[in-house]
Image (cartoon, rainbow, N blue to C red):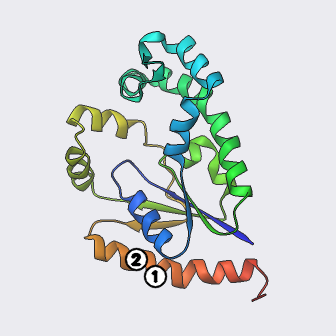
Amino acid sequence: MRFVVGVTGKIGSGKSTVSKFLAKLGATVIDVDKVAHEILETENVKRQIVEAFGKEILTDGKVNRKKLAGVVFSDSLKLRLLESIVHPVLREEIARRVEKLRGLVVLDAAILHRIGLDKLCDLIIVVTAPLDRIFERLRAKGLSEGEIRRRLSFQNDIPLEGIVVDNEGDLNSLREKVEKIYQQILLPRIFSKQGGVF
């Protein structure tokens, strides 16, 4: 039996923290960004990226993600081009990994719907946070105001469907919300999906 939960939300909203709390409760978490980074280094994808964005995207033969981000987050057409190269391969790889897993599986992805991974999910959790908190968290990670605004502008299409978790409080408050969702929503659905067989 497998039950797949998509955890999504804007950059800096706390979706990865929610995923970590679910991991502590026994979930297997697939960090979609990390898988995407692996895919950038596959020969076929790297070749297409160099063809699309030029060799200056490479550093020591590897895709320089910071340079690539600088290019695509300043131009929506270039971002869509990158997504057209990466997303089909990413969808296939995530589906392959999910197929091998059992139990509670979490897909941690800011743009879950845009990639098309929502179709793999039994339930979606959307993590939201006040913009001032998002900016505070991302500045602490070293992003400039301009970088934060650009990245957020490309994440305006996250649908508020499924379970919405407002991450406006502290870590303990968020942990309590996740544990409540796990106990009251996830466990009953997991048990009903496996048909009551224990």
Q: Secondary structure at mark 1?
A: helix
Residue pictured at 63% horizontal, 39% vertical: 90
Residue 129, image x, y percentages: 32, 59
Circle 2 is placed at which residue position? 177
Looking at the picture, does residue 63 appear above or below residue 160?
above
Q: Residue at x 43, y 43 (%)?
A: 156
Residue drawn at (33%, 33%) of the image:
150
Which quadrant holds residue 177?
bottom left
Between the residue at mark 1 and the residue at mark 2, the CA separation in whole angstroms equals 5 Å
Q: Name the amino acid, label 2.
A: Lys
Quick check: 56 above or below 17?
above
**Label 1 belongs to which residue?**
180
Q: Please state the horizontal and vertical placement of residue 67, each as a whole percent of the image.
A: 37, 22
Side (left or right) of 75 relative to 193: left
Front-lying residue, 90 or 41: 41
Above or below — where is 82 with respect to 3? above
Residue 31's x, y, as percent? Answer: 51, 52
- Is the N terminus in the top left, top right, bottom left or bottom right quadrant? bottom right
Q: Is residue 50 above or below residue 165?
A: above
- Identified by mark 1, the residue type is Lys
